Amino acid sequence: MKGNIKLRQLWLFQFFADFTAISAAYFFTYFFRFHSDVGGRFFTLINRATGIRDAGDIGGSFEEFYIISAPRIIIILTCVLCVLYALLNLYSERRFILKRPVAWNVIQANIAALVVFYAYFYLQRNVFHPRSYFITVLFFNSIFCVLFRSWTDKFLNYLRKRYSIDKHTAIVIGTNKDADYIKSVIDVLHPHGLDLVGRVTTREEKTFADLIVETEKCADAKNVDMIFVADNDFTIAEIMRFMELADKLQLSVKILSDKMSVLQNQAKIPADRIHGVPLVHFDQPRKSTIRQGVSSMLSQLIAVVLLILFSPVMFIVALLVKLTSEGPVFFIQERIGVNRKPFSMYKFRTMYDRAEEAQAQLEEFNETNGIFKIKKDSRITDVGRMLRRFSIDELPQLLNAVKGDMRIVGPRP
């Protein structure tokens, strides 16, 4: 779409709203506590009720400290809260099309932050900071954060409607109730500026090759930014073919398939669920940026440090694996990594040698969809069972992190 300015870093707007909310909550609490009769009486009541200090001593010596230390405390609050927000997927950009429980996640993050600060005060034996002050800051921040994020969303939606800024077009592939539902969600909500501009039907008379060709032509003709693959009947091989097409066209892709359940259940990748089926988002391959380069270097540095620290444990585990069963120490498997590039992932071997050859005989006992897994797998060694229980078998993945195949912080493989 000509003239359409697209916001590639949508999370920056959310971060700005969060930082503004934290700053507003801090200074609102400051004026509420030190320059408001209602606030003064409120804190006096709280401190009397909890027996923290006498009412006459409440806050007088803290006013100057909290105004001088405002930048430092706000930065600390921002760092802690925004990390928690990120862990709760509050900076998910266009990963989801369904509404998320933003308010609930914000409240959870602020409660967790309060626990972190209280634990710090306790461990440091810090009796200077009034606990009620931080409770009030985080209480108001929860309100302001939800409010400012809502205003930010409305502002962005206004820009999209009024000036056609940040509109992202998409096509959906599928002829079923799931595809219909996705279309209705996008047509009504236009989540994150998404607009559905085309649909490729899946009819019986079409071959899969025809479907791929039609999808590519439609995506090119409509100049889209995203593809929705909304047919649960596609095989893994066909799904991978759609992902290859998205790579070729430099597009994001969302895959609706119960075969993607493994990514949500095992790898813990968050996703929408449409009629109980996960809709998994894959970003378009991106060129390396300075931020990504710094993040990669930091991850590799941490991995090197952890590898050195855990090397005695890994040496002992390697000996146990080697001495208790025949076969190699490491289990090496090909996985898909950054920008969907394959790499060899390392783990400590937890099964008897050539266990994969016996999988066909146990297929009828498979308890999950999309990945082979049974509770009492006879192929797992006694040592392997212990390693899996405490996830020690995954320590060799630090080697992958050092090589740059994986990151220290991210979903499980």
Image: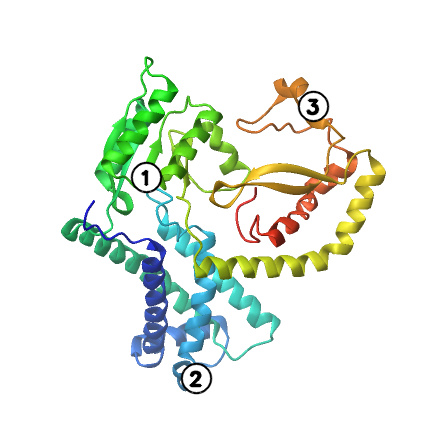
Q: Which residue is mark 2?
A: 65
Q: Residue at x 55, y 37 (%)?
A: 266
Sequence-wise, the earlier of marks 2 and 1 is 2
SS for dot 2: helix
Q: How is the image coloured?
A: rainbow
SS for dot 1: strand
Quarter-of-image position of residue 352: top right
Q: Nearer the viewer, mark 2 or mark 3?
A: 3
Quadrant for the N terminus in the image: top left
Q: Nearer the viewer, mark 2 or mark 1?
A: 1
Where residue 284 appears, x then y in whole percent? 39, 44
Q: Residue at x 53, y 26 (%)?
A: 369
Residue 338 in the image: above or below residue 371 = below
Q: Which residue is mark 3?
A: 357
Q: Nearer the viewer, residue 263 or 149?
A: 263
Task: Give yes or no for contact between labels 2 and 1 (Cβ–Cβ under 8 Å).
Answer: no
SS for dot 3: helix
- Identify which amino acid the numbered label 2 is placed on: Phe
Where residue 316 appears, x then y in whole percent? 80, 49
